[in-house]
Amino acid sequence: MAWSLKIFRFAGINVYLHWTFLLILIWIVLASLNSGEPAVEALMPVWVILSLFGCVLLHEFGHALQARRYGITTERITLLPIGGVASLEKMPEKPGQELLVALAGPAVNLGIAAAIGLLILATGMPFHLFPLFEDIGQINDWQGFSSGLLKMNLILFLFNLIPAFPMDGGRVLRALLAIRFGRADATSIAARIGQFLAMGFVLAGLFAPNFLLIFIGLFIYLGAGGEANYEAQRSVLSRLTVSDVLMHQFTLLHAWETIGQATATLLDGQEREFLVTEDNQIIGTLSRDDIIKGLQQYGKEERIKRILNPEWIRLSPGMSLNDAFEEMSRRKLSICPVFENGELIGVLNQENIMEAVMIESAKGKGQRA
Ligand SMILES: [Zn+2]
């Protein structure tokens, strides 16, 4: 994600902070200082916000560390003003595992709330559960801080368990349905339940009237549709293999060719990505963007060897198209060579894959009609 700052690395996972988050902190500090109270007390809302995001971060680590048990890595965790995002390589496909990964985040917040609750009991601080939503600006001592943080963790716990994508509760629901219906059907049922709930939120928000409810409703509505599309695409891709969509016609570039020659090849045909060879071996790939950037930077006389992308992987024709697609997306590869018995038989690019999804989806609709 652009505009994020890496703040630290823990358990092999980089943690990023979105810059808009810093703006919010600065704004709160300024607002607090203006109120003219003694420094530490005046900054109480800042401590509350920082602690709240600490809890969001622990929530995301809950997902990431549970996923790691199933061999799924997490590239990064990003903290945004509206919450956190753990970029898991993928969700586990076994319903039981998805269930535990989805529950691990909210469970962390419940754990934190319970720990603060014990602390409050032990110290005999006064505590009122209601109103559940506290005005952060009104918190001005450590007692308010403790009970505020407890309530916020309860809210995080409940909010994330709303049974609709993209909330954790949506995944919990999908995982439970998948035990009975299979993943693809479970996703579309869960997505429909989510959209139904979302409309409920929007309606309630309009009647109340409460802008926050409307916002949550729209957020869930879009998230539910997105997850259903993603799952439909995944299910199409896992029915196909690399050999179903690979291209047998393709142009190889040679490492000693110039950027000018590559530009001519680019203009001459439909291909946008190329494999680059040297001594009959593939040594990398070159995309249209690489060529244009190279042209700007080095001019047309430079060899393409200087600008190629050296990372590539070999695919085999029998490989599931979904596995190939996930691997290509993860490594940000736009084209891959396909080998059979050590021989180069074709190439696969992202565009092929998207075309296959569109064609298969169109076929599916025809059969149903
Ligand atoms: Zn979560």
Image (cartoon, helix red, strand yellow):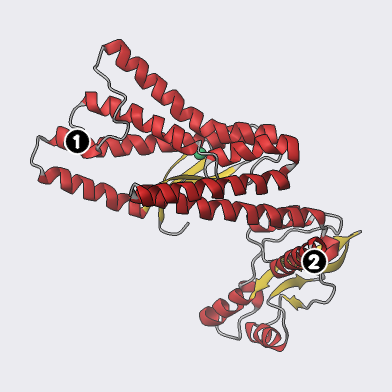
Residue type at the position of mark 2:
Gly
Position in image of residue 163 (x %, y %): 55, 39
Can you tell me whether the CB of the residue at mark 1 lies under 8 Å from the nearest atom of ligand 1? Answer: no
- SS at mark 1 in the image: helix
Name the residue rendered at 69%, 43% in the picture: 186
Residue type at the position of mark 1:
Gln
Residue 8 seen in render: yes
Q: Of residues 231 and 3, which is closer to you in this image?
A: 231
Name the residue rendered at 19%, 27% in the picture: 141
Position in image of residue 217 (x %, y %): 46, 50
Mark closer to the observer (2, 1): 2
Asked whether the beta carbons under mark 2 and mark 1 sit within 8 Å of each other, the answer is no
Name the residue rendered at 51%, 36% in the picture: 161
Mark before the other along the chain sequence, 2 or 1: 1
Res 120 quadrant in image: top left
Q: Is residue 56 above or below residue 111?
A: below
Q: Is residue 41 above or below residue 87?
A: above
Residue denoted by label 2: 366
Q: CA distance from mark 2 to mark 1?
A: 60 Å
Residue denoted by label 1: 138
Q: Quadrant of the C terminus?
A: bottom right
- Say whether residue 145 is left or right of residue 283: left
